[in-house]
Image: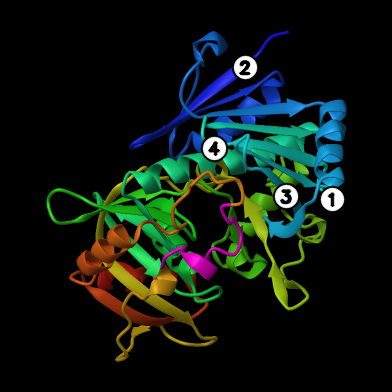
Amino acid sequence: MTTHAVRLEAADAAVDVVSADKAVTDWTTRYFGPWWKAADVPADSVCTGPLVIAEVDPGKYADAALAVTQARNESTTYAKAQLLLTRDVAAGVILGVQPGESLAYRSEPDVGSLVISGCDTEPVATATARLAREVMRGMLLRAGWSVLHASAVVREGGVVLTFGQKGAGKTTTALALANRYGWGLLANDRVFVRPNETGGVDVLPWPSAAALGLGLLDALNWFEIARERLQGGEQLHPTQSRRVTDALLAGDREPLWENGKELKVQVFPDQFERWFSVPLATGGEAAALVFPRIEVGADPAEEDSYRSLSGGDFMSGETEDRYPDVFALARVDGGGTEESRHEVAHRLAELPHHSVVLGHDVAANGDFLAKLTGGA
């Protein structure tokens, strides 16, 4: 049986992803390639270092799921789905199963091995990308990187970081500059940062699908592009709700809601370039911080209030509510070590800070932000 392997590399981290199903390794390459280095490697060269093995095998999933459910286990939530966990401390093994997703996991953190088993290719591929990124996160965190809850765009190597809670306008701000002025999109919602030797802060992408509301998609003039692509048989990320897909195909631009949360379009990283002609950036150095808020009918303007970084701006502790370190892949705080976070915050505090109000006119927002941050 042929085995396929892909090596992911970014800064100080590398991990190999191995599967007999080429669709799984192709998914990994597609997901990470635009922002990190992702390259096919001979499977027989994969012998040391962190390893993620992906198996599309209903029988192996059933055996793994049975082992977890028959043992004493605990229930938690991981990536918005129930996860049952059991640990064999003596053997150094963590077992997990997500019954609703038909996925099982076997993590051996001491030897750097993670096995993902499932019944269907797409769920296994999605989980493999997610967990390979977590392995990379662990290595980067242990090498002194931190993770900020921020979006980022790059112009001539200088990174504008955008902060705020969900709905504050991080994505709106970043895409206004990327779409209007061709600035490189470096990250959406999360970003790696580390103090460098020249007194600045280096910035590295956190590869992920991007969530865009239907209204924002329309304001960017991307709605019809996405609709035509879907009508032509292409697909957006599978985490997207079917209701959103149906709305796009029907030409319905009204925001969709479920249990108080907006349902959004889920865009693959490579689709920014292929569909929307937005360039992606692979790194830079922090140059400015923007703290936006969105107000219907507002003209974009700078506000008098001053906002600075806080502990909640790092994906640390309770802020990391989506990907807790249940498989002991990071083994340090999810936002980075305390020393690294402190130094990043200290250095970023010396950069220009801009608290702004933005309206729904994306072009006006982009013009204002470019002028404010020195890019116009």
Q: Which of the marked residues, 3 or 1, is nearer the chain's N terminus?
A: 3
Under mark 3, the amino acid is: Leu
Q: CA distance from mark 4 to mark 2?
A: 23 Å
In the image, residue 98 above or below residue 320: above
Give the class, few, some or many, for how many residues have Cα within 10 Å of label 4's Cα (few <14, many ≥20).
Answer: some
- 237 vs 184, nearest the viewer: 237
The disc label shown at residue 109, or none: 4
Q: CA distance from mark 1 to mark 4?
A: 25 Å
Callout 4 secondary element: loop
In the image, residue 20 above or below residue 91: above
Q: CA distance from mark 1 to mark 2?
A: 27 Å
Q: Is residue 92 left or right of residue 135?
A: right
Image quadrant holding the N terminus, namely: top right
Would you say the residues marked 2 and 3 are in contact, meaning their CB atoms lie under 8 Å apart? no
Image quadrant holding the C terminus, namely: bottom left
- The residue wearing badge 2 is 4
In the image, residue 260 above or below residue 24: below
Give the class, few, some or many, for how many residues have Cα within 10 Å of label 1's Cα (few <14, many ≥20).
Answer: few
- Of labels 1 and 2, the one closer to you: 1
What range is drawn magenta here?
A: 314-325
Q: Which of the marked residues, 4 or 3, is nearer the chain's N terminus?
A: 3
